[in-house]
Amino acid sequence: MTKLLSYPALKIILEFLDPIKRFHITARSASMQRFEKSIPIRVMSLFTNSNCLCLDYMAVSSSATGEIDFRLRGKSYLIRSWVRSIPLKLPIKEITRKMNNLYLGRRKNFYSASVIFADPFLQLSLPENFKVLTKGVETFGNLFEEYIPIIDTRSFPLKYLGAKLTEPAHLSHPALRSLEKLDVEEGFNGMLQLIEEKTPCKYVNFCSDTVPTEDILNLLRKWQKIGKEVGTTFEFVDYEEDPEFSKFPRLMETFSQYKNKKYNKTSESPFFIIPIAGVASNICVFNDDEEQQIIIKIVIHITRRSASLRRIDKSIPIRVEDLSISHSFLYLDDEGIITEPEMNFYLTGRQSYVAKCVTLGGPSRDITFPPDFKIITKELISEMRYFVKFLPIIDQSSFPLRRLLTEIEEPAQLDHPVLRSVDELEIETGFDGMVQYINENIKSKTVIFAHEVPADDFLTLIKNWMKNGKELGTTYKFFDFEASDRDSLMWKLKKNFSKFENERSVSLPQGKKSSNMMRLLNLLFLSYQLIRQLLVLIIHITARSASMQPFEKSIPIRVMSLSIGSITLCLDDMLVFLNETGGIEFRSIDELYDEKRNWIRPIPLELPTEERARKMNNFYLGRRPNVYSASVVFRDPFLKLSVPEDFKVLTKEIETYGNFSEEYLQILDPRSFPLETRGRTLSVNTKLIEPAHLNHPAIRSLEKLEVQEGFDGMLQFIDEKTPCKHLTFQSDVVPTEDILNLLRRWEKNGKEVGTMFNIMDYDEEPEMSKMPQLMETFSEFKNKKYSQNPDSPFLIIPIANAASNISVFKDDETGHIIIEVVSTRQHKREGSEINSNESKKAKET
């Protein structure tokens, strides 16, 4: 039976699921709602105004009658609509706010190809801290700067912007200087000239009739005289129905001599073709009657229609991605030319072609190239020919080549200097013994054999590399003919090198059932590296196969979390525990209330609880030389844990549930210490009841320590003698006076940047809370820009003679006071205000 995916495993599927279907699915699952907000959401378009939200083809709007209207639209028609009533009588703005919170709130990553803000920013009831990552923004006639706070900083540089520009200063905004397309919805006098001179955007559309005709005429005269980059396009609105306001008659009068004689009254045909002095490009002016637009575009000359321009055009190199030439056709990227006159026009008399990849040759007769014809490239494909005959047309600047595909008929052809210096060599056909010859004489690190290679040559190459070695990164690729198993290179490779089989593969008798089981087991073990939910399935499979059990224990087992108690064992999302009736109960943590995934196995023998726990742990953990877990939780004192003899676990995080951690060190794999040499951080959650506990080597090498229970004077002792930079007190074991002394000591003597102490505070009971006394003692250091969120420090205390500060935060959710040493540069980046008049020394520093 196929194993169903757990809800957390659906995260990767939900991220790329159609957003509308995703909302409907998660709305009906309480389990999914817990993590759905943390998964990035991707839409093609986001539209929002004061009472409406549109995500792709779904529109949700609120009304003053207390209803929410849902509409699903196709490309040009309404698919479905329905209404939901809200029982509470709320203002329309409050309904909209709740609606937006449901779809947009508490999402860390919201991606949209384009965003439309249809109302001023203050009228949008968007969730707090909402950010959208996009490359296109339209503001419906509003100023762009209003919406910058809700645009993710990763969005810049933007590709498209539609906004109102009411003064020249708006053009200086960095976002406008990196655009590919700009739509100006409202402008100012002289705007056209400023945009043309100061904005590098090549595509500008003026959506309203705000550009005077004289400005357009001056623009054309300027471009005609000094030129403009090819591809530049300016579009202007023109009201042709009213001759008094239409711009086009004036353009016809001024540039009548440049009227296109072949104008066919279509939007693709230019009305004017104005040549630019001294360059091979034109200004094309189009008249789009349907859109009522004048389009001015800089294009390449159609040089075949002008003998004088052809001389200029031939001297300019043509740049393409792919160039393919044979005796009967020519391909420039996706454009194909198949007639001989056309080919002569594109090839004869040209200075050079610059192409990323060039394909020459073919199955028919040889190609005749014009005299002095040259190609500059880094990738040459010589189809069905030895490449040397094409070298006369390859420019010398192309060498050494990055890639070469050719035929090889004899060893002497491999001695050519061009072939010996290529990075990647691909061979269409070859000769006997070619693999060995290339291995010994060719320096190319990547060689592709696109033909069938004898198996003996293939095996000899591997034996040679095993004996003599080969440069790191060398890659040989072979075509493997798999008409039958015995004809394939892979079959012969396995037969001759079986002793080097991957350690995760196993050898079983070749009976039909055993062979199938071996394939299944290999599949499970390989899949486990990607989907750890298969762990329990693997254990259950091996429990039913006597042939698998001898080697299954020798295979490393990897989990994200391991939790051990006196009668419980938890491996990732599987919980196994002893129940009151004497049986063993299995449960899935993610689906605790799904009866299909919860079951009980009775134990026939009446055994003591400790013996049953020992057998349970031996089955899952016993005789395993390698158990890896990202974190380990010990839920009971060590003496109450029935762990197998010689059991060891390699981990980087320990939690001891109020017990001292030294008890459990004996079952930690020695390879875990010292963790600093592995670039990892050990996190220990433990109880410290005397100063001697802090002198243990395992504690002194920590970067993160969580203390569940402590002793008097512990805070000062840890600060002075323990190098740990991250300390958390999970209970109220630190007196307020110790915290004040700590702050005074750091203020005077300083502390390493990055040090963070988290101290529990009961703010629900003012008599026991520590925060009021901290506020009273250090009131002069209160942050003037404190914004009442966990990321904003309440106090910023400067450290004498150091470029760092002590930041004091209050986390209402966890009930912790967070004391962190940060650099002054970080405060400037985050926008916190440092009181400059409190510390003269800090100010001077």
Image (spheres, grey):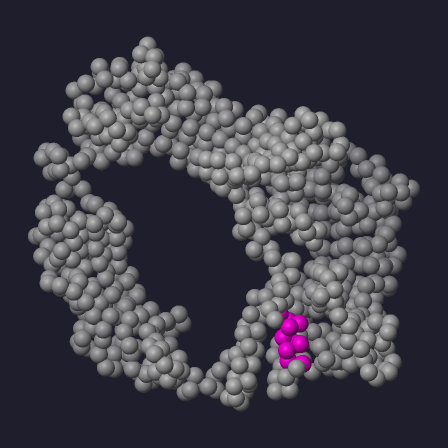
- At 23% from the left edge and 60% from the top edge, which residue is drawn? 380
The x and y percentages for residue 711 are 87, 59
In the rendered image, residue 538 lying in the magenta stretch gets the answer yes
**Image height check: is 154 above or below 171?**
below
Q: Is residue 299 left or right of residue 193?
A: left
The x and y percentages for residue 218 are 28, 18
Determine the image quadrant of residue 727: bottom right
Q: In the rendered picture of this protein, how many numbered marks are placed on residues? A: 0
In the rendered image, residue 798 lying in the magenta stretch gets the answer no
Determine the image quadrant of residue 459: bottom left
Of 354 and 588, which appears nearest the observer?
588
Determine the image quadrant of residue 577: bottom right
The x and y percentages for residue 199 are 39, 29
The x and y percentages for residue 124 are 61, 29
- At 34% from the left edge and 19% from the top edge, which residue is drawn? 238
Q: Is residue 159 left or right of residue 125?
A: left
**Image height check: is 145 above or below 423?**
above
Quarter holding the C terminus is top right
**Image height check: is 636 above or below 732?**
below
Furthest residue in direction top, as rendered: 244
Over which residues does the magenta segment extend?
Answer: 534-543
- At 87% from the left edge and 80% from the top edge, which residue is drawn? 608
Of 636 and 13, which appears nearest the observer?
13
- Does residue 507 appear in this view? no
Q: Is residue 206 left or right of residue 24?
A: left
Main secondary structure type of the part rendered in magenta: helix
Of 501 and 280, which appears nearest the observer?
501
- At 56% from the left edge and 38% from the top edge, which residue is drawn? 80
Of 151 and 169, which appears nearest the observer?
151
**Image height check: is 688 above or below 774?**
below
- Does residue 498 appear in this view? yes
